Image (cartoon, grey):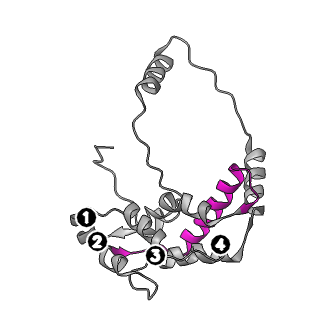
């Protein structure tokens, strides 16, 4: 929102509890037209439940059962550790552009997000591609860019993208 008067940014510890930070753009013309028509009509659209509480819990249990090789877990851990500017694992551009990096919850979010992505893709095993697919929404709110990054126009997403080229994939993904 443009107006944020009376609101306060969440502290890092609270931000870290959100699994993803999803960027949502404005709707297309057609989508906005549909929104305008359906929300201003005389009758409200009927809403039907697609899942109940037990269905959601079943899906969460199923996601946790998706297989992940130790090498893919290691890749996720290495990716997160590379975001920490004071770590020996951090590349120079991380030391230059980040004030602080992601904590252990980021690893958990990468792994669970990767499992969910694999399942949605019809697979029962996680690949490094799944980890990379969820990395931006998992990491973007967990990285604090420095003043230098802001002045150079370097975003958290840019840093994550560069990390994909720095962090080695395990053999055999």
Q: Nearer the N terminus, badge 3 or badge 1?
A: 1
Q: Nearer the viewer, mark 3 or mark 4?
A: 3
Which quarter of the figure has residue 117? bottom right
* Residue 99 among magenta residues: yes
Position of 16 relative to 70 (above/below): above
Q: Position of residue 111 (x, y in %)?
A: 63, 66
Q: Nearer the viewer, mark 1 or mark 4?
A: 4
Q: Nearer the N terminus, badge 4 or badge 2?
A: 4
Distance of label 1 from label 4 (alpha carbons)? 32 Å
Distance of label 4 from label 2 (alpha carbons)? 29 Å
Q: Position of residue 21 (x, y in %)?
A: 47, 55
Q: Position of residue 155 (x, y in %)?
A: 34, 62
Question: In the image, which residues are magenta?
Answer: 98-125
The residue under the point 78% across, 51% down is 58
Numbered mark located on residue 150 in the image: 1
Q: What secondary structure is the magenta-colored segment mainly?
A: helix
Q: Nearer the viewer, residue 156 or 100?
A: 156
Q: Nearer the viewer, residue 85 or 41?
A: 85
Q: Which residue is mark 3?
A: 166
Secondary structure type for disc 1: helix
Q: Nearer the viewer, mark 3 or mark 1?
A: 3
Q: Which residue is mark 4?
A: 72
Q: Are marks 1 and 4 in contact (CB under 8 Å)?
A: no
Give the crowd class for mark 3: few <14, some 14-19, many >=20 residues within 10 Å: few
């Amino acid at each position: 929102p443009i107006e944020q008067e009376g609101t306060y940014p969440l502290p890092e510890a609270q931000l870290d509890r959100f699994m993803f930070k999803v960027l949502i753009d404005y709707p297309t013309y057609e989508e906005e037209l549909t929104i305008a028509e359906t929300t201003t009509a005389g009758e409200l659209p009927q809403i039907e439940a697609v899942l109940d509480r037990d269905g959601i819990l079943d899906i969460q249990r199923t996601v946790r059962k998706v297989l992940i090789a130790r090498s893919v877990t290691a890749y996720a851990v290495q990716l997160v550790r590379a975001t920490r500017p004071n770590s020996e694992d951090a590349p120079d551009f991380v030391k230059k552009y980040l004030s602080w990096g992601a904590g252990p919850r980021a690893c958990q979010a990468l792994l669970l997000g990767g499992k969910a992505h694999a399942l949605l893709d019809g697979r029962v095993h996680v690949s490094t591609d799944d980890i990379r697919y969820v990395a931006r929404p998992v990491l973007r709110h967990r990285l604090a860019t420095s003043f230098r990054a802001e002045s150079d126009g370097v975003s958290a997403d840019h840093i994550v993208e560069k990390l994909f080229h720095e962090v080695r994939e395990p053999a055999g993904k």
